[in-house]
């Protein structure tokens, strides 16, 4: 599936304008000539001379409790999270003092000539002392001919240097092995990197994936995307990581491969935050963070999935139907797209972040009265579309009962031909839910109507318009989170101008 963004756009760090701790804009400067990829580089971490500030950060709250010894973790690199990150490190330090910390991180600026880069010659200067690289391991990585050694990209890579003060403070005797990975690194290389690391990592080493989650989205969208990320990571569904809305699926992929090989498959999320939690104000572009730790054992399986539903598509629909993933295409140019998807350019957001990260997208069904079947996180979902008056109520009831018996979640799209919602429309929706439908989505009515919970189902009488080429219109996107015990939704208002939907203020 194509995504927004131009050919030179990359997954950049989402910087919040006001950092709670005034450290988000600290510069990273080399003290030596960085022209030689093998020459030692000393990198200044955030405010290396301000001991009172760092003591305030690292003693700002109680340690987060760890139930067991972790050998793998996911921690953000967004500087606004510093106080929470300190509590996380403080909790880890009570359970483990690793000799080496392997840091897997995104290559934010796509620096260097190879997909995977490490270094043996970078040292981080922190307020707690020099954090050095463990020189015995980068050479082993380079020997695989998979990883190149180049110090220069680390000079500006905040996904690594953000962690330097915390590691030196809480693991004072540890050394690090930093590894940065480009966005488009093929999965075959990530598989090989996982195997190489499995063979060289010592039993007491800690593997840290430095990863931020949702970017450039409002809080409600970020929270919705984080639900999918939470389940996918917890369930060790590594092949689905690449359709999540996170800044380095590759880092999490390699981490989970290593944890699986070591028998540490119990992934537990200890904390989650959003930049709004720190700025205390509404943000049009927030950043979310999740803190995972991996313990010895098997996954605590999370059953459920997220669903995005849209309003009417008024015009010839040639490609916008049902999808179980949405992948960002950096080379996508809307002006060269002549399908109905070209109308999405104003709503995609930076790097297609608005759409990425949902388990199932329901825009329309290509064929009516045909059941489309999907499965994710042990949830079987079916989607079918009917047109008003095509069948009798008895026939609708018979079909719905049969379909609902064969799945966990049944979604019915019902096309009203009258274009107006009247009381019989309400009775029709209730009839579908009474016979086993979990979600009812009315289509063909221009005015959006508030979603309602009816018995154990969700009724969306009308989501209004989503694409309307003939003039201005209004509608909504509905985010649905389905679990076997709970069905919840959030509506996102949309306005449509000359066919193009965009988020309403």
Image: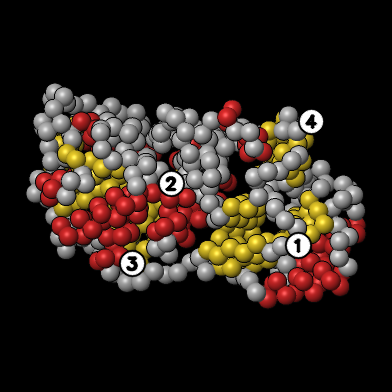
Q: Is residue 29 left or right of residue 501?
A: left
Instruction: Give the position of the C terminus as an image quadrant.
Output: top right
Q: What residue is disc 3 on?
A: 265
Q: In which quadrant is the N terminus drawn?
A: top right
Q: Nearer the viewer, residue 451 or 184?
A: 184
Whether label 1 touches label 4, CB < 8 Å: no
| Kind of element beneath mark 4 | loop
In the rendered structure, find residue 246 and report the number of the disc placed on it.
2
Considering only order in the chain, which callout, 2 or 4, is on the residue closer to the N terminus?
2
Task: Report helix, strand or loop for mark 1.
Answer: loop
Q: Residue 320, percent across and down?
A: 65, 46
For discs 2 and 1, the disc positioned in front in the rendered view = 1
Whether the residues at callouts 1 and 3 have beta carbons within 8 Å, the answer is no
Question: Image check: 454 left or right of 81?
Answer: right
Q: Is residue 57 visible?
A: no
Q: Which label's residue is closer to the chain start, 3 or 4? A: 3
Real-space Cα separation, disc 2 to disc 3, in angstroms: 20 Å
Mark 4 sits on what residue?
A: 471
Q: Is residue 270 left or right of residue 309?
A: left
> Residue 231: where, in percent of width, then height?
47, 60
Task: Say which residue appears at 47% left-offset and 50% top-offset.
Answer: 243
Question: Nearer the N terminus, badge 2 or badge 3?
Answer: 2
Q: Which mark is residue 369?
A: 1
CA distance for labels 1 and 4: 30 Å
Front-most of residues 239 and 83:
239
Image coords of residue 258 (percent x, y): 27, 60
Q: Determine contact: label 2, label 3, CB under 8 Å.
A: no
């Amino acid at each position: 599936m194509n995504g927004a963004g131009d050919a030179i756009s990359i997954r950049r760090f989402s910087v919040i304008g006001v950092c709670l701790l005034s450290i988000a804009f600290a510069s990273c400067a080399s003290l030596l000539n960085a022209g030689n990829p093998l020459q030692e580089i000393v990198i200044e971490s955030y405010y290396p001379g301000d001991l009172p500030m760092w003591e305030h950060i690292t003693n700002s709250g109680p340690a987060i409790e760890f139930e067991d010894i972790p050998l793998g973790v996911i921690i953000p690199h967004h500087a606004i999270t510093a106080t929470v990150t300190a509590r996380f490190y403080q909790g880890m330090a009570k359970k483990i003092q690793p000799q080496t910390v392997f840091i897997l991180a995104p290559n934010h600026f796509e620096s260097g000539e190879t997909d995977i880069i490490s270094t043996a010659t970078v040292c981080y200067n922190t307020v707690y002392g020099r954090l050095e690289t463990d020189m015995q391991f980068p050479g082993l990585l380079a020997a695989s001919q998979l990883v190149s050694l180049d110090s220069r990209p680390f000079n500006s890579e905040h996904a690594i240097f953000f962690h330097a003060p915390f590691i030196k403070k809480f693991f004072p005797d540890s050394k690090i092995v930093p590894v940065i990975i480009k966005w488009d690194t093929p999965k075959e290389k990530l598989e090989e990197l996982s195997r190489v690391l499995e063979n060289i990592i010592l039993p007491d080493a800690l593997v840290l994936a430095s990863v931020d989650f949702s970017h450039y989205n409002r809080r409600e969208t970020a929270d919705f995307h984080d639900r999918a990320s939470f389940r996918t990571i917890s369930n060790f569904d590594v092949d689905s990581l690449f359709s999540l809305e996170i800044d380095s699926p590759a880092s999490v992929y390699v981490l989970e491969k290593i944890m699986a090989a070591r028998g540490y498959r119990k992934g537990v999320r200890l904390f989650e935050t959003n930049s709004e939690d720190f700025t205390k104000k509404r943000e049009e572009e927030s950043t979310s963070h999740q803190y995972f730790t991996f313990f010895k054992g098997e996954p605590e399986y999370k059953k459920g999935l997220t669903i995005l539903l849209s309003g009417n598509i008024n015009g010839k629909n040639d490609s916008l139907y049902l999808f179980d993933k949405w992948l960002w295409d950096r080379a996508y140019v809307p002006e060269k797209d002549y399908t109905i998807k070209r109308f999405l350019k104003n709503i995609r957001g930076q790097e297609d972040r608005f759409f990425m990260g949902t388990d199932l997208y329901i825009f329309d069904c290509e064929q009516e009265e045909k059941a489309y079947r999907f499965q994710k996180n042990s949830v079987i979902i079916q989607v079918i579309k009917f047109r008003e008056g095509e069948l009798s109520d008895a026939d609708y009831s018979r079909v719905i009962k049969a379909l609902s018996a064969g799945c966990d979640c049944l979604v019915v799209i019902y096309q009203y031909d009258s274009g107006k919602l009247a009381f019989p429309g309400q009775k029709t929706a209730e009839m579908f839910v009474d016979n086993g439908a979990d979600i009812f989505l009315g289509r063909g009515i221009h005015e959006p109507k508030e979603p309602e919970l009816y018995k154990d189902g969700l009724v969306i009488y009308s989501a209004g318009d989503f694409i309307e080429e003939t003039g201005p219109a209004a509608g909504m996107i509905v985010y649905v989170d389905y679990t076997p015990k709970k069905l919840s939704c959030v509506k996102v208002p949309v306005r449509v101008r000359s066919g193009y939907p965009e988020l309403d203020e």
